[in-house]
Amino acid sequence: RKEVEQDPGPFNVPEGATVAFNCTYSNSASQSFFWYRQDCRKEPKLLMSVYSSGNEDGRFTAQLNRASQYISLLIRDSKLSDSATYLCVVNTPSTGGFKTIFGAGTRLFVKA
Amino acid sequence: DVKVTQSSRYLVKRTGEKVFLECVQDMDHENMFWYRQDPGLGLRLIYFSYDVKMKEKGDIPEGYSVSREKKERFSLILESASTNQTSMYLCASSSTRDRVFDTQYFGPGTRLTVL
């Protein structure tokens, strides 16, 4: 089982739609969680951190469910510019400290 | 703004060649990382460094080595390139001492093709 798993998609949605991505992680001791965004042929960039209480940034809402070991990202009112790959990132304790594990990403296409 | 630069965007090398990939960050970050990214596999950590002259193996270090002689520069070396090292290579840096919560900033990537 992968340490961080995401549905690879692609998700094809019309403009204005609401879309949700889930990500599961295997290590219950994982300590911090993030969503990164990666545009085609570009580098990943931090979209938002994910806090236990859930957090919102404009049209984006991230949630953490520690009991079920998953995090989610909700995008409301999708824009064409939201088309990208969304990477789930988990920091997990490891020998000597911790390690950062990236999911393989979920591709989103928003169409007019 | 944090800036992480990589020496080349595209590189084509032949099997057996020695390859140097360089990464420079301008924000005085302590931590630097090298990843490779392949379709369906996501980012996999090759090596990382938390200080000058310090290096630690990541998940897939075989066939690679690194050098960090200066804080701002982290080099990835392929001693003898092979076709299975054809990939996108991404360098990243981060700053906080509490590394659990750090944000990693990525360079633009180097797409390496080994023929």
Image (cartoon, grey):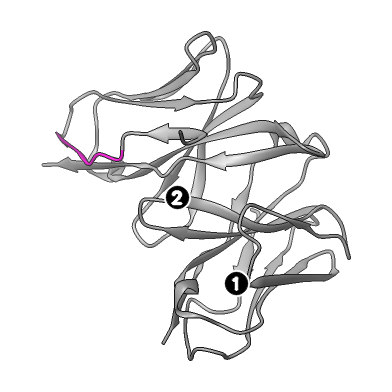
Left or right of A74 on screen, residue A51:
right
Q: Is residue A9 magenta?
A: yes
Chain letter for the residue marked with disc 2 in the picture: B
Report x, y in % for residue B13: 49, 89
Structural crowding at the residue carrying mark 2, measured as other residues with C-alpha within 10 Å and reported as few (<14), some (14–19) or many (≥20): some
Magenta-drawn segment: A8-13
- The Cα–Cα distance between marks 1 and 2, rounded to whole angstroms, is 20 Å
Q: Are marks 1 and 2 on the same chain?
A: yes
What's the residue type where badge 2 is placed? Gly
Q: Which residue is labeled 2 in the image?
A: B42
Report x, y in % for residue A7: 31, 34
Quick one: SS at disc 1? strand
Q: Quadrant of residue B23?
A: bottom right
Chain letter for the residue marked with disc 1 in the picture: B
Viewer-proximal residue among A63 and B19: B19
Q: In the image, what residue occupies the spot 47% across and 36% down?
A: A2
Q: Which residue is labeled 1 in the image?
A: B6
Left or right of A6 on screen, residue A53:
right
Left or right of A16 on screen, residue B3:
right
